[in-house]
């Protein structure tokens, strides 16, 4: 088998039958390998490598498994960088296979800028935003490097990896020796060896003791729980411990139907849910976090002292993340969330009764005032309420993100749909291709809920959903402005708008004409997907 055939075969053997890609002639041998296996694996051709990369992120988030994205060198790789950065910051396991020029054309360590056609040093560019990035210089190294990259992507704190494969290597046959060497990549095994029964037991004892030592314990659940494939374990734990819990924004869809769920926390939250969550962290005497890096957005740093009266215990898989302390004397438990939560859910000694404290939290949640933003969110909340449970929503950046987050909060105690966020990067242009990825992960209708500005980044993917007749609904929350920027100018520059409104340089396009040009349906009222690609263009003034 050639390197490209081996890699395609490996992807199929891992149970992945979708890849997102954009061609380049250096990717030619991969395309041919994919063509030969087209009954077993689908290559989804987006119309921009940034879209391919975000689609891979959306696929991984929705499927809760690794995604694959193939791109060419040079402009293909540079176009994908935003998606790689998104995967890095939100710990999404994606393997990027980037083609590279022929090894004889490498500029190497020389100071010249380029020798090979469209040559660029992809590895140098992505080094700071990948868990592993390597050029494969010998065909026989490919199986080992692939196995290693794959295991690194899915072990510990997950994230993107990239293999840079010169075109001559991609067409070279691998020998038996090369295939054998792959067995030496034992990253995953070493990872699980670290968390033997003794380690899990010690971690569990610390967390149980911390919770039971408090009169007002609060759990903060982060996106790391889902990344650790530990959602069911978390539910079992919460049902056993019966402690109130809040989530960070990207974990908002974790367990909303739970009677112990008290909202999401952070500076996008408002009203009874978000404001209440802040009040709860203020009153709690113990805060235990699982898989939340307590980002500045989550703890609204600078605005207040986080959890001022609490002992803070942070459970995280990433020791590096824990080098940033948010509180003095915080306790760190480095552990795999799935293994630990499974043990915590089965705690034999049991947990204290926190009924009184839970009622306090419930009162805080219910008596908090709704901001104007929550009122505007009501129609979106009602719309979300109509969606079939299995539909996945994706969310962009800007005010529309806060609106969607608040709409989700308004659906009190209901089980909400999965919502995919670009949390760390906050990238405009994420939501639409991520919805395409989520569609391929689930095969179910997807809803991209986005601003008029965000939609213009990767708008070319309308061609993708039209051509493949994908049941994707794009809800454009259209305020004819870059609302987030205009809001900043309202607050800081006496509403002297610049580059943000329709009379200061920005322009929202005629979405009806655009829908017509691409051949997708168009309407103005919020309704469920009709099984066809559609833009719902809703005016909103916020
Ligand atoms: C790629 C990228 N460029 C710029 C920004 C900065 N930014 C954040 S929100 C925003 C405006 C978004 O406008 P729109 O999608 O219409 O949402 P609205 O705030 O109006 O709801 C901008 C420019 C960003 N987050 N991402
Ligand atoms: Mg807007």
Image (cartoon, helix red, strand yellow):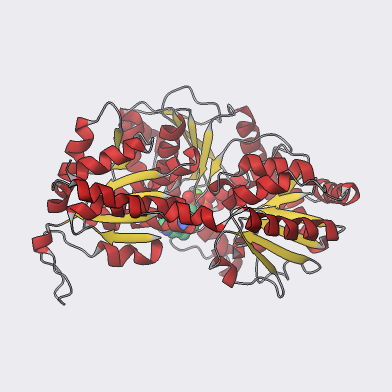
Q: Nearer the viewer, residue 410 or 121?
A: 121
Q: Residue at x 21, y 50 (%)?
A: 177
Q: Nearer the viewer, residue 262 or 405?
A: 262
Place of residue 325 in the rendered image (x, y in percent of width and height, measured from the top left): 63, 72
Pick out the residue farthest to the top: 530
Q: How many marks?
A: 0
The answer to which image quadrant residue 145 occupies is bottom left
Place of residue 330 in the rendered image (x, y in percent of width and height, measured from the top left): 70, 70
Specify whether residue 79 is in view: no
- The answer to whether residue 104 is left or right of residue 456 is left
Q: Nearer the viewer, residue 265 or 371?
A: 265
Q: Residue at x 43, y 40 (%)?
A: 59
Pick out the residue farthest to the left: 104
Pick out the residue farthest to the bottom: 111
Place of residue 150 in the rendered image (x, y in percent of width and height, measured from the top left): 37, 50
Q: Residue at x 15, y 76 (%)?
A: 110
* Quadrant where the N terminus is found in the figure: top left
Against 531, is 461 above or below? below
Place of residue 133 in the rendered image (x, y in percent of width and height, measured from the top left): 32, 60
Q: Nearer the viewer, residue 343 or 525?
A: 343
Specify whether residue 442 is in view: yes
The answer to which image quadrant residue 194 occupies is bottom right
The answer to which image quadrant residue 307 occupies is bottom right
- The answer to whether residue 216 is left or right of residue 197 is right
- The answer to whether residue 181 is left or right of residue 388 is left
């Amino acid at each position: 088998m050639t390197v490209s055939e081996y890699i395609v075969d490996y992807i199929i053997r891992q149970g992945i039958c979708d890849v997102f890609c954009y061609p380049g002639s250096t990717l030619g041998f991969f395309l041919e390998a994919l063509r030969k296996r087209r009954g077993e694996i689908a290559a989804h051709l987006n119309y921009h490598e940034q879209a391919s990369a975000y689609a891979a992120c959306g696929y991984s988030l929705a499927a809760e498994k690794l995604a694959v994205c193939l791109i060419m060198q040079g402009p293909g790789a540079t176009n994908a960088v935003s998606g790689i950065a998104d995967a890095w910051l939100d710990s999404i396991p994606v393997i990027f296979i980037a083609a590279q020029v022929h090894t004889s054309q490498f500029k190497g360590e020389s100071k010249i800028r380029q020798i090979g056609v469209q040559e660029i040093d992809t590895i140098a560019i992505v080094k700071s935003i990948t868990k592993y990035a390597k050029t494969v210089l010998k065909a026989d190294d490919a199986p080992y490097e692939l196995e290693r990259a794959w295991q690194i992507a899915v072990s510990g704190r997950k994230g993107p990896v990239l293999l840079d494969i010169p075109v001559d290597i991609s067409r070279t046959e691998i020998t038996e020796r090369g295939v054998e060497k792959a067995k030496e990549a034992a990253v995953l095994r070493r990872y699980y060896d670290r968390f033997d029964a003794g380690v899990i037991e010690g971690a569990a004892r610390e967390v149980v003791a911390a919770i039971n030592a408090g009169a007002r314990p609060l759990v903060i659940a982060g996106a790391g729980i889902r990344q650790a494939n530990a959602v069911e374990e978390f539910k079992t734990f919460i049902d056993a411990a019966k402690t109130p819990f809040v989530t960070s924004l990207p974990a908002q869809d974790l367990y909303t139907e739970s009677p112990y769920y008290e909202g999401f926390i952070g500076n996008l939250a408002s009203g009874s849910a978000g404001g209440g969550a802040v009040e709860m962290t203020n009153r709690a005497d113990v805060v235990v976090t699982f898989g939340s890096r307590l980002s500045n957005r989550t703890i609204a740093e600078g605005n207040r002292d986080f959890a001022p009266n609490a002992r803070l215990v942070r459970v995280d898989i990433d020791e590096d993340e824990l080098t940033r302390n948010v509180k003095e004397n915080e306790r760190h438990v480095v552990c795999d969330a799935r293994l630990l939560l499974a043990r915590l859910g089965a705690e034999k000694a049991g947990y204290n009764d926190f009924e009184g404290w839970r009622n306090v939290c419930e009162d805080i949640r219910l008596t908090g005032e709704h901001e104007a933003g929550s009122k505007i969110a009501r129609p979106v909340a009602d719309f979300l309420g109509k969606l079939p449970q299995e539909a996945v929503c994706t969310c962009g950046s800007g005010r529309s993100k806060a609106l969607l987050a608040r709409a989700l909060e308004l659906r009190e105690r209901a089980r909400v749909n999965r919502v995919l966020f670009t949390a760390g990067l906050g990238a405009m242009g994420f939501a639409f291709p991520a919805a395409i990825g989520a569609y391929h992960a689930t095969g179910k209708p997807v809803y991209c809920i986005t601003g008029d500005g965000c939609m213009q980044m990767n708008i070319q993917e309308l061609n993708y959903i039209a051509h493949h007749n994908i049941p994707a609904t794009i809800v454009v929350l259209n305020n004819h402005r870059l609302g987030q920027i205009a809001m900043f100018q309202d607050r800081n520059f006496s509403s002297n708008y610049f580059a943000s409104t329709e009379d200061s340089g920005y322009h929202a396009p005629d979405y009806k004409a655009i829908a017509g040009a691409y051949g997708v349906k168009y309407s103005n009222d919020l309704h469920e997907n009709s099984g066809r690609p559609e833009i719902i263009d809703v005016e909103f003034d916020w």
